[in-house]
Amino acid sequence: MDRPGTNAQYHLVEESIVGPKPATLSFTDAAALPLTSLTAWEGLFERLGLREGEAGRETGTLLVTAAAGGVGAMVAQLARALTDLTVIGTASRPESVEFARRMGVAHTIDHHRPLSRQVAGIAPGGLDHVFSTAGTDRNLSAYADMLKPFGGIVAIDDFGPVEIGLLKSKSISFHWELMFTRSLHRTPDRARQHHILTRVAGLVDRGALTTTATTDLGTINAAHLREAHRILESGSAIGKITLTGF
């Protein structure tokens, strides 16, 4: 992330932060997984501290915004595979609602309408956790309203100053998640990402997770890279966009 070259045909990567490709996926479908699966895993199980698998499966209610996006779809899949959380996801179009539900979202709400009233109709007792992939600044007040005391928020988007004091009366915790932190700062535990990706590959090969790749734009060249960025910046992308071959 801190140097150019990732659109090159060959790229040198430290082994401690990569994992094996799932045997059941093509290279294209596998390429859609690492960034989103690391972001989702670290956000859920490290930042929010949720229990998974053998550690005793987490229960409660989780809201994930942009649930049909790359990260949101992986959050929903991991929650379905490794926890007993009820996942509520935001999605506004029929195609994004369908994709989010296929990824593991139990209930969908429209992020173009006020969130609190919609969530109250599904979880009248409130939320336990929020995984905010987009709109954290404009939704923070709603999160504070919807979350139970001692709930938690993990955010991955970029925004300016927010009124963090809104969270104090309920002792709501706020966490940042950036999957590049370990590699950027060369943290002593950066090999943890190797182990997460190895676990994800195993879950894919067992059928518990699937790729979130939805659109392949073809050969990796300048025109196709520009088109990929145009789609992403439009805010209408579903899942992950891939490019294949040079």
Image: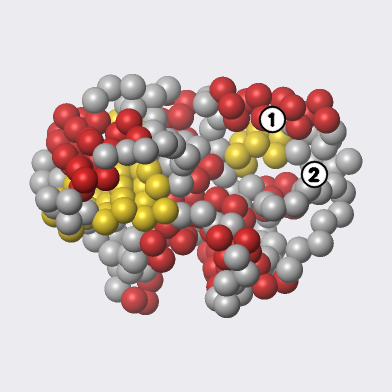
For residue 92, say whether it is visible.
yes
Q: Are marks 2 and 1 in contact (CB under 8 Å)?
A: no
Q: Position of residue 220 (x, y in %)?
A: 82, 37
The residue type indicated by label 1 comes to: Ala
Give the structural element (helix, strand or loop) at label 1: helix
The residue type indicated by label 2 comes to: Asn
Mark 2 or mark 1: name the one nearer the start of the chain: 2
Q: Mark 1 points at which residue?
A: 228
Mark 2 → mark 1, Cα distance in angstroms: 13 Å
Find residue 115 and report its image quarter: top left
Q: Which residue is drawn at 81% across and 62% down?
A: 12
Q: Callout 2: 10 Å neighbours few (<14), some, many (20+)?
A: few
Q: Where is residue 48 in the image (x, y as percent from the top left)?
A: 34, 61
Q: Name the residue under label 2.
A: 7
Pick the front one: 201 or 171? 171
> With 115 as the anchor, is 178 left or right in this view?
right
Residue ranking furthest to the front:
161
